[in-house]
Image: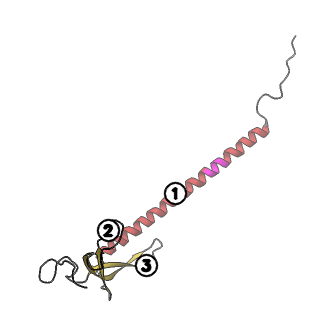
Amino acid sequence: MKIHRIHSGAGESLVEVTVSAVIFLMMMAVLQGSISFCTNAQHKSEEIRQENAEICRNLQSASYIPGAENMTYLFKATTADGETPGAEAAVLFRIAVELGTKEVTYLDADGTPKTTTFYLFGASDAKGTGEADDGTEDTGGDAP
């Protein structure tokens, strides 16, 4: 009769099974943390989107507050190397604008009212719109 020996190297030991279970549980913890983070980020994104939509709605109905300062922006022609050919000869056109504001009040995610100020360019007068006061086109040749 043949004697069969039990091989000690066959199968998994208790230590190997325990280590495998610990590694599996650590991976599940990382997965759960990433899912939780993504869920929180999605909720925050939805709150921000709703706030921005309310700000845009309120901005459309907000009244324009004229500013005290008027500016004239000059648009000049340049050469291929970026130089301006003469001081007044290079002016293509001018745009006169008024620097104004619009204030928007909205509720944030906590229900607290907040106010945001938007700075806008408004038309200061007929000059700078491409037409002179007498109905002829403004070529931008005169000083502002």
- Asked whether 28 falls inside the magenta stretch, the response is yes
Amino acid type, mark 2: Thr
In this view of the protein, which residue sits in the foreground, 54 or 136?
Answer: 136
Within-10-Å neighbours for mark 1: few <14, some 14–19, many 20+: few
Quadrant where the C terminus is found in the figure: bottom left
Q: Position of residue 100 (x, y in %)?
A: 32, 82
Q: Which mark is residue 19?
A: none
Q: Position of residue 141 (x, y in %)?
A: 21, 80
What is the spatial separation of the Cα atoms under label 2 and label 1, in whole angstroms? Answer: 55 Å
In this view of the protein, which residue sits in the foreground, 130 or 40?
Answer: 130
Q: Which mark is residue 39?
A: 1
Q: Is residue 27 left or right of residue 91?
A: right
Quadrant where the N terminus is found in the figure: top right
- Rendered image quadrant of residue 127: bottom left
In this view of the protein, which residue sits in the foreground, 103 or 66?
Answer: 66
Numbered disc 2: secondary structure: loop
Q: Position of residue 134 (x, y in %)?
A: 12, 83
For residue 21, above or below residue 94: above
The residue wearing badge 3 is 113
- Rendered image quadrant of residue 7: top right
Q: Position of residue 9 (x, y in %)?
A: 81, 29
In this view of the protein, which residue sits in the foreground, 65 or 62?
Answer: 65
The residue wearing badge 2 is 79
